[in-house]
Each structure stands twice: as structure tokens, then as C-alpha cells.
Image (cartoon, helix red, strand yellow):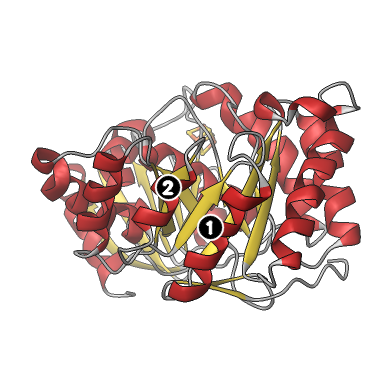
Amino acid sequence: MNGYKTKKIRVGRLFIGGDAPLAVQTMWKLPLSATVLDDCITELMTLEKMGCSLVRFSVPDMESAEFLGRLAERVSMPLVADIHFDWRIAVRVMDFPVSKVRINPGNIGSRDKVANVVKKALDKGIAIRVGVNTGSLPRNIRDMDRAEALVTAAEEELSILESLNFKDVIFSLKASDIETTVKANRIFASRHQYPLHLGLTEAGPLIPGTVKSTAALLPLLRDGIGDTIRVSLSDDCRKEVLVGMEIARASGRLNMGVNIVSCPRCSRYSFDVMSFLKKAQDYLQTVNKPLTVAIMGCVVNGPGEAAHADIAISGVGKTIYIYKQGKKVQEVAEDEAFEAFINHIESLI
Ligand code: SF4
């Protein structure tokens, strides 16, 4: 990793930047209302088990600010209020225990409006993310090179925040294309020590969004750029966290959760890896310990992968073999394999 050392910023019970672990986050997809708060709390608990460190909510009006506030009073997970256009909503939402407010320089308005947000954030000890997107750049810089424009918009907002003596700030510079996102973040990281929230905005549906986000984020993370990531998918929050965690692990910046090794299956298979994974995957995603699990279809690579896995499973005919840290520990019938496999994982966590 290169030496992009950033400031460490408190975001609720979490730290972002400096020597803090890379944080994976997501964004809630639906409006909040009184009837959905309980379901939302349950889902936040699942997201947290999957490795999600914070969740952002759009706050388009005062009513949304009240609902987010009620939610923030009931959960310990850091919640982020995402504000566009109206600084008064940002000020109101900070009456509640939200952990961070995101503002967009392209639409939050004049220095005075930002100053009102900053004053309240200082009073409450709440961090601010300045989130710049190519889709909503300030008008005066829209003709610039897009990466340079992202950096310019972020730096203009930074100069306002620094003039107000506000330092607890995280930046994001996002485009929907890989090159612009990578270039803008490299420039910003080379000039400033504020933590960076990385993401490719509007990355697309699950598969293209995953590929494009990985292509953009992985080289940055491997170079030590980026302190928190969000994968923007036209899919649910769990998928965003799942992909974010895979990218975080692949970058070598996070050692948490289960690394699944599984065979793609071919006509040689005697153990149906795909059906087994369909049953096991939801559970494995919530195991919050660094484990490697190998799920293999036959004896060709099964024992070899088992040697490097904490728990491995493979089969010959109707007999299923379970390996623990390279040693065969159990033979079971196919219909008993799932329960036995889960029991062995539970013994390690
Ligand atoms: S492990 Fe066996 S079943 Fe799976 S792809 Fe390899 S040869 Fe085929």
C-alpha cells in the first residue's frame, strides 16, 4: 500500500480514516414511515451481521427527518442522513442521534447555508460527508474535465468548511464511469488527508454493477486510497453489502466474514454444490469471523481445497465428507450434510 494516510474521523460509535478498518456501507432503498420502522430495525441487524458498518438514508423533507430521527434513537448502528437542496433539513435531523450528514455542494447552496449546517454539526459533534457527483456538479464547473470538476467542487466546499474551522469531514467523488472515478479520487488523495468514501455512482444492476464497482474500487483500495466504500446497485441493500464485503476482502484491507471457495460444477460432480450453496449462503453471509469455507463437487479438487479451508465439504456418491482445517472429521449421508456442515462452522465461531 502507498502512503495515503488520512485523518481519523469519529462517525457515531465508528471511526473512519487513519488506522480504522475499511468500513462497508449501504443506502436504504425505501421511504421511512411509522409502519416500516420495526422492519427497518430488523433489517439493519441483518446488514450489520453481514459486515455493514453504517447505513445512509435519503432525507428529502422534514417528515423524513423525523422518521430517521426516531430510527436513530432506537439503533446503535451509525446512520447517515443524506440531504440535498434544503440546509434546514440537515439542521433539523441533527437534533437526533444521527452519526453523519451528507451534503452535496452542487445543490446545498451558498456559503451561509453551509455555515448553518456546519454550526449545528460542530455543536452536536456530527461528521459531514461532502458528496460530489458528476450528475449534480455546480453549474460553473460543468464544462471542465469531469474528474477535475469533481475535485474542484470538493475543494471549493473544503475551503468553506476549513474557513469555518470544521475538520470532521469525509469526501466522496463519484462518477458512473470507472476512469473518472479513479482519476478524481487519485488526485484528491494526493492533495488532501481527509478520509475518502469510495463508490461508483449508479453502477447498474447486480452483475454489471459488481464488475464496474470492482474495477473502479479495487485499484484504489489496493493503493491505500479509500476509507469507506459503498457499492451502488439497482438491487437490495444486502447485495450492496455482500459485494462491498467481497471487494473489501479482495483488496486485502478487511479480514472479516466468510471467504467462500466453491466449485463451478461439471459433469463429474457427485455433490450438488449449487443446491447446497443456495441453502448455505444466507447463513454464511452473516458469519462475522474470518473463515475460508470450501464447497466442492467431487474428489478432483475437493481434498486439495479442503487442505486450505477452515471447513470444507465434498462428496463421493451419496457419501459426504466434511473436513475441518484440512482433516477429514465426518462422513455423513447427503440429507444430513447441511446440518453437519453448519454445526462444524458453529464450532469455530
Ligand atoms: S471440483 Fe469436481 S465437480 Fe467441481 S468443477 Fe472440479 S471436477 Fe467438476
**294 or 7: nearer the eye?**
7
Which numbered dot is residue 88? Answer: 2
| Residue 287 marker | none
Q: Is residue 14 visible?
A: no
User: How many labels were placed on the picture?
Assistant: 2
Q: Residue furthest left?
A: 35
- Cα separation between marks 2 and 1: 8 Å
Residue 298: % across, % down: 45, 40
Mark 2 closeness class: few <14, some 14–19, many ≥20 residues within 10 Å: some
**Could you say which quadrant of the image residue 166 lies in?**
bottom right
Q: Position of residue 312 (x, y in %)?
A: 41, 57
Dot 2 amino acid type: Arg
Residue 247 placement, left or right of 65:
right
Q: Is residue 146 above or below residue 36?
A: above
The image position of residue 335, as x and y in percent, is: 15, 43
Looking at this view, is 216 or 8 the one in front?
A: 8
Q: Secondary structure at mark 2?
A: helix
Instruction: Identify residue for label 1.
Output: 116
Q: Secondary structure at mark 1?
A: helix
Q: Tell me if label 2 and label 1 are in contact, CB under 8 Å.
A: yes
Establish whether ligand 1 lies closer than 8 Å to the Cβ of label 1: no
Location of the C terminus (image quadrant): bottom left
Rendering quarter of residue 182: top right
**Can the viewer see residue 235 in this picture?**
yes
Measured from the top left, where is residue 186 in percent x and y?
Answer: 86, 49
Residue found at x 38% / y 35%: 60
> Would you call the spot at circle 1 few (<14 residues within 10 Å), some (14-19), or many (20 or more)?
some
Task: Name the quarter where the N terminus is drawn.
Answer: bottom right
Between disc 2 and disc 1, whose residue precedes? 2
The residue under the point 52% across, 57% down is 117
Amino acid tagged 1: Asn
